[in-house]
Image (tube, rainbow, N blue to C red):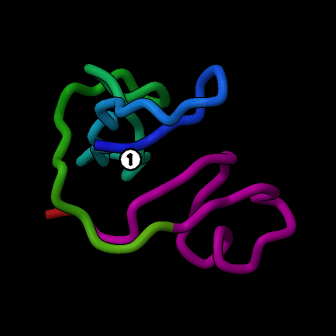
Amino acid sequence: MGLQLKGGEYTEFKMAKQKACRLCNTIYEGDKCPKCDSKESTESFKGKIVVLNPEKSEIAQKINLKAKGTFAIKTR
């Protein structure tokens, strides 16, 4: 559960569970991966990497990421 400010009062809301795609490691919420359309996902992953500019990111180049996004470092 989370809290959000609405109309001057805090209300509770359910936070969506993040999943990581087992094929491309993209972290997302929903039924299928927005990058590769796979439904193979896991809620069990370690670490996150956020890539804003894959062309200039040394880490993105080292792990062969060519797109912007949030990725799991390791999926189980």
- Name the quadrant of the N terminus: top left
Does residue 68 appear to the left or right of 73 in the view shown?
A: right
**Callout 1 crowding tier (Cα within 10 Å): few <14, some 14–19, many ≥20:** some
- Nearest to the observer: residue 72 or residue 5: 5
Residue 49 x/y as whole percent = 54, 67
Quadrant for residue 29, please give it: top left
- Name the quadrant of the C terminus: bottom left
Q: Is residue 26 magenta?
A: no
As displayed, is residue 66 above or below residue 75?
Answer: above
As displayed, is residue 72 above or below residue 68?
Answer: below
How many tags in the picture? 1
Residue 69 x/y as whole percent = 61, 47
Q: Which residue is drawn at 65% across and 68% down?
A: 60
The furthest residue to the right: 56
- Nearest to the observer: residue 70 or residue 55: 70
Does residue 51 appear to the left or right of 76 in the view shown?
A: right
Say which element carries label 1: loop
As displayed, is residue 61 above or below residue 28?
Answer: below
Does residue 13 appear to the left or right of 43 in the view shown?
A: right
Q: Name the kind of residue labelled 1 in the image.
A: Cys
Q: Which residue is drawn at 16% across and 59% down?
A: 44
Q: Does the magenta stretch include residue 65?
A: yes
As displayed, is residue 59 above or below residue 44?
Answer: below
Quadrant for residue 15, please give it: top left
Q: Which residue is drawn at 32% across and 23% down?
A: 30
Residue 8 x/y as whole percent = 65, 29
Residue ID for mark 1: 24
Residue 64 x/y as whole percent = 57, 65
* Numbered range of the magenta stretch: 49-74
The furthest residue to the front: 8
Q: Which residue is drawn at 39% across and 70% down?
A: 73
